[in-house]
Structure formats: structure tokens, C-alpha cells
Amino acid sequence: MKKPKVLVADDEPLNIEPVTLLKDYDIIKASCDIDVHIKVEKTLPDLILLNTRISNKNSCAACRELKTNQKTRFIPIIL
């Protein structure tokens, strides 16, 4: 059975590390807002865990951009 893909976005690697221990999920790491958009479009994860501040961008702005994109708007995002 295919594991659900979860993209975890945080610019602090120590915050991402505990999530990578989850064996039932395919964890995709992103460390900046540009990385988030590239990896989301490339992998189309089942869920996005987004830090409230990633790099210099407000996560609400990043969330808005993802939700206005036809390809990514259906992906649930947890801030």
C-alpha cells in the first residue's frame, strides 16, 4: 500500500526532525517558501504542515498562493 505523502515546511531543521520518524508516511521536507512551492507542485502531497513563518514569507501568504493554484488548491494545509 502506498504511504500518504506529507510535506513538512519549516526553516528550522530541528522542528522537522520528529516528523521524519513517522514510518507510516512519506515525509517530504521543505526549508523555505520557494522550496515549498517547487516540492508541492512536483510531488502533490496529501497534506502540508506549514510553519507560521517560513523564511521571509508569512505562511498565510504562502497558503493563499497554494489555494489559488488549480493544481494545489485541493491539498489540506495545517499551519
Image (spheres, helix red, strand yellow):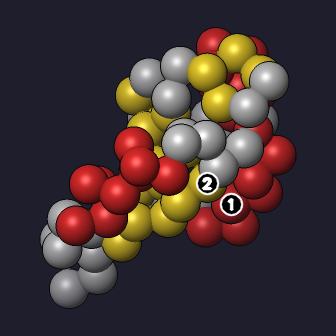
Outermost bottom residue: 1
- The amino acid type of the residue labelled 2 equals Ala
Does residue 22 sit above or below 33 in this rendering? below
Q: Of circles 2 and 1, which is in front?
A: 2
- Judged left or right of residue 3, residue 52 is right
The N terminus - image quarter: bottom left
- Judged left or right of residue 5, residue 38 is right
**Res. 71 visible in picture:** no
Q: Residues within 10 Å of mark 2 (few under 14, many from 20)?
A: many
Residue 43 in the image: state x and y as whole percent: 61, 67
In terms of secondary structure, where does tag 2 sit?
Answer: strand
Does residue 43 sit above or below 76 in this rendering? below
Does residue 77 sit above or below 48 in this rendering? above
User: For residue 20, what is the image quadrant?
Assistant: bottom left
- The amino acid type of the residue labelled 1 equals Lys
The C terminus - image quarter: top left
Does residue 47 sit above or below 68 in this rendering? below
In terms of secondary structure, where does tag 1 sit?
Answer: helix
Dot placed on the residue nearer the N-terminal end, 2 or 1: 2
**Res. 63 visible in picture:** yes
Which sits in the foreground, 11 or 47? 11
Query: CB under 8 Å between callouts 2 and 1?
Result: yes
Residue that numbered label 2 is attached to: 30
Which sits in the foreground, 11 or 30? 11
**x 17%, y 71%: residue:** 24
**x 71%, y 26%: residue:** 62
Residue that numbered label 1 is attached to: 39
Which sits in the foreground, 31 or 61? 31
